[in-house]
Amino acid sequence: MYSPASFLAILPFPNIDPIALSIGPLAIHWYGLAYVAGIMLGWLYARSLLARPNLWPGGTPPTSREKLDDFLVWAAAGIVLGGRIGYVLFYDLAAVLENPVRAIEIWNGGMSFHGGLTGTTITMILFARRNNIRVWSLFDLVAAVAPFGLFFGRIANFINGELWGRITDVPWAIVFPTGGPFARHPSQLYEAALEGIVLWIALRVATHGFRSLHKPGVVSGIFVCGYALSRIFVEFFREPDAQLGYLAFGWLTMGMVLSLPMLLIGLWAIWRGRRAAAAN
């Protein structure tokens, strides 16, 4: 006799077409729309933060909304190029070395958040220097809106039926089409909740409740720490990439290895921001 939990644990994956819209030979994927939605909503939220001078040191936002519009293109380039290069270096290097063309075959691989973060950080530094913007405040502005992109990106991962979790018998487990005949953790939804919703709430409390934007670097540090902790936690439920598997101990994954330095960097950024604000 099946219990309700065992029945739910064998529910199939919802039949969602990864292609949102087709116009002749042109196919628009949910994954691409997720990137657009995350960037556009983040841009709108960033504009609203810049419209609140009292949130910023000295009552002066770090940049104008017009320059933010210019930065949008820089940010998109940093996210996409950094994300793809990071995926190749961290997760698919052996296959790319064997077949270099694979590096541009994005349908054979994905995007790395850690690579996207690195790419965006580089573009922020370059853009800040070129436009005479306080770099730590630009970091904080982007960090405050980043959960929008993370949320929609993870939802797109779920729709694509990729990056699923480990085999489990929890009541909410799902059988993914590409995951074999096994019920698995919907780890993409765990990440969407933690990296998207929970992290955005924490950052909102920091920016509007504790006025942390007055201490440049603190909001960036909270974001980096929050993401690292969320990712490390979810990695215990997420299936590691097949080409890498577990790196050690039967549980250590590449996601954990890449997130641990982030946690240290985030703590340093918070300490540095608080110390600098106290000195002024």
Image: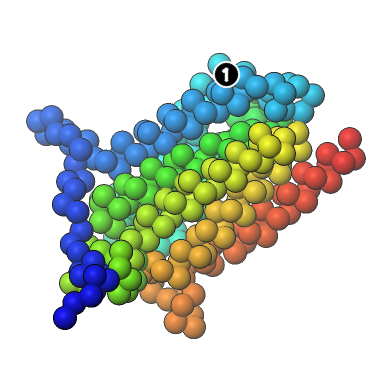
At 32% from the left and 51% from the top, the residue drawn is 157
At 26% from the left and 41% from the top, the residue drawn is 30
Q: In the current view of this chain or complex, which residue is farthest to the left?
A: 24
Q: How far from the left and from the top, in percent, is residue 122? A: 58, 41
Q: Nearer the viewer, residue 149 or 104?
A: 149
Q: In which quadrant will I find the N terminus?
A: bottom left
Count neighbours of disc 1 (C-alpha within 10 A) and say few if under 14, some if 14 to 19, many if 20 or more: some
Which residue position is annotated with label 1? Answer: 65
Check the image and report above or below for 88 versus 247.
above
Q: In which quadrant will I find the C terminus?
A: top right
Q: Which of 274 and 105 is in front in this view?
A: 274
Q: In which quarter of the image is residue 102?
A: bottom left
Q: Is residue 254 left or right of residue 173?
A: right
Q: Is residue 110 left or right of residue 258?
A: left
**Helix or strand or loop: what does disc 1 sit on?**
helix
Q: How far from the left and from the top, in percent, is residue 225? A: 62, 54
Check the image and report above or below for 10 versus 196.
below
For badge 1, the amino acid type reads: Arg
Q: In this view, does 133 lie to the left or right of 251?
A: right
Q: How far from the left and from the top, in percent, is residue 244? A: 38, 71
At 61% from the left and 33% from the top, the residue drawn is 141
Q: How far from the left and from the top, in percent, is residue 161? A: 25, 56
At 48% from the left and 32% from the top, the residue drawn is 42
Q: Is residue 254 left or right of residue 220?
A: left
Q: In the current view of this chain or complex, which residue is farthest to the bottom?
A: 249
Check the image and report above or below for 170 versus 39.
below
Check the image and report above or below for 236 versus 273.
below
Q: In which quarter of the image is residue 12?
A: bottom left
Q: Can residue 125 be seen in this view?
A: no
